[in-house]
């Protein structure tokens, strides 16, 4: 059997667990803990197969958040989350005493470079907000070993522009796709309804954003998100 845990073949009885870990979403290590608890005592080589799948699960969601085409789509969590998951992955590998899979950091570095190049193009075309902060890009670049010297112009722009969170990016992508003529808003029952209208004042697209968090009181972060998205919709008010 190979000494590389990433290359060990999966026995048929572990295939379902490995598939689940490969596609574990936002919490690969939580899913790993549940798998190990459910399966009970395993041979060390079988545990390593599950741990390798956990690493792949981390890499999958990091790549998702470094794909500029995903910005504003429901699964996207942004540069900040990519950096957080890179830190979690690094800590996980340190605890195991494993290196990352061969070529993984180079691939992530290339993904980040493509993200920044696409961001430069979007901002040059007049988009009024950045898809991440300069600090998030720099933190992620340090972890994947990307030389940022070719990206100083876009980093400066990102540092000077408003940055919606991933919920705000989702709202702006959805509303911006409607190509409306005016915008309208109203608030009711702890939510803000933002609409894009056609030239007759009819809604083309709408999105609701919460104004409250877990309590009945208005949440300042939710309010800030709503106000930022409203300002960044590039249309006159109806």
Image (spheres, helix red, strand yellow):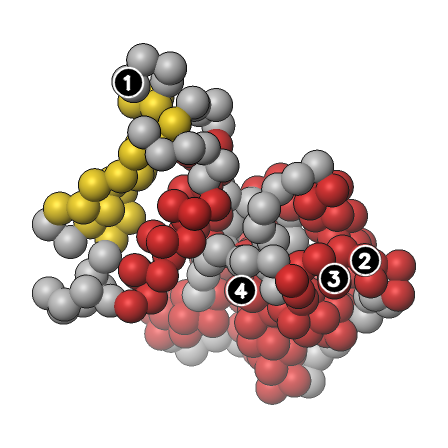
Query: Neighbour class for label 3 at 10 Å: few (<14), some, many (≥20)?
Result: many
Q: State the CA–CA distance, disc 2 to disc 4.
A: 23 Å
**Secondary element type, mark 3:** helix
Task: Give the number of the disc on residue 81.
Answer: 4
Q: Residue at x 43, y 47 (%)?
A: 231
Task: Give the number of the disc on residue 155.
Answer: 3
**Residue 139, how many percent across, how many down?**
68, 73
Q: State the CA–CA distance, disc 2 to disc 1.
A: 40 Å
The answer, for residue 216, to whether it is visible in the render is yes
- Mark 2 or mark 4, earlier in chain: 4
- Mark 1 or mark 4, earlier in chain: 4
- Mark 2 or mark 1, earlier in chain: 2
Q: Quadrant of residue 150?
A: bottom right
The answer, for residue 65, to whether it is visible in the render is no
Point out the image quarter for the N terminus.
bottom right
**Residue 131, how many percent across, how many down?**
59, 53
Nearest-to-viewer mark from 1 and 4: 1
Query: Neighbour class for label 4 at 10 Å: few (<14), some, many (≥20)?
Result: some
* Name of the residue lying farthest toward the top: 200
Q: Residue at x 48, y 65 (%)?
A: 28
Residue tagged 1 = 202
Point out the image quarter for the C terminus.
top left
Nearest-to-viewer mark from 2 and 4: 2
Q: Are marks 3 and 2 in contact (CB under 8 Å)?
A: yes
Task: Give the number of the disc on residue 153.
Answer: 2
Q: Are marks 3 and 4 in contact (CB under 8 Å)?
A: no
Q: State the CA–CA distance, disc 3 to disc 2.
A: 5 Å
**Secondary element type, mark 1:** loop
């Amino acid at each position: 059997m190979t000494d590389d845990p990433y290359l060990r073949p999966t026995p048929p009885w572990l295939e379902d667990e490995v598939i689940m870990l490969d596609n574990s979403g936002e919490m690969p290590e939580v899913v790993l803990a549940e798998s190990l608890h459910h399966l009970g005592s395993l041979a060390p080589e079988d545990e390593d197969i599950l741990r390798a799948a956990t690493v792949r699960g981390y890499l999958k969601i990091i790549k998702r958040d470094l794909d500029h085409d995903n910005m504003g789509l429901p699964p996207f969590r942004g540069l900040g989350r990519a950096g957080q998951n890179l830190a979690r992955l690094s800590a996980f590998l340190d605890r195991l005493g494993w290196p990352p899979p061969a070529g993984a950091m180079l691939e992530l570095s290339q993904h980040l470079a493509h993200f920044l190049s696409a961001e430069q193009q979007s901002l040059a075309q007049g988009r009024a907000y950045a898809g991440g902060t300069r600090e998030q890009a720099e933190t992620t670049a340090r972890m994947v070993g990307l030389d940022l010297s070719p990206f100083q112009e876009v980093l400066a722009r990102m540092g000077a522009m408003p940055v919606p969170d991933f919920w705000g990016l989702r709202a702006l992508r959805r509303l911006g796709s409607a190509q409306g003529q005016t915008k309208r808003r109203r608030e009711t029952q702890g939510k803000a309804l933002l609409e894009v209208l056609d030239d007759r004042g009819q809604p083309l697209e709408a999105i609701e954003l919460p104004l409250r968090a877990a309590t009945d009181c208005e949440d300042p972060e939710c309010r800030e998100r709503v106000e930022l998205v409203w300002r960044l919709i590039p249309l006159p008010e109806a």
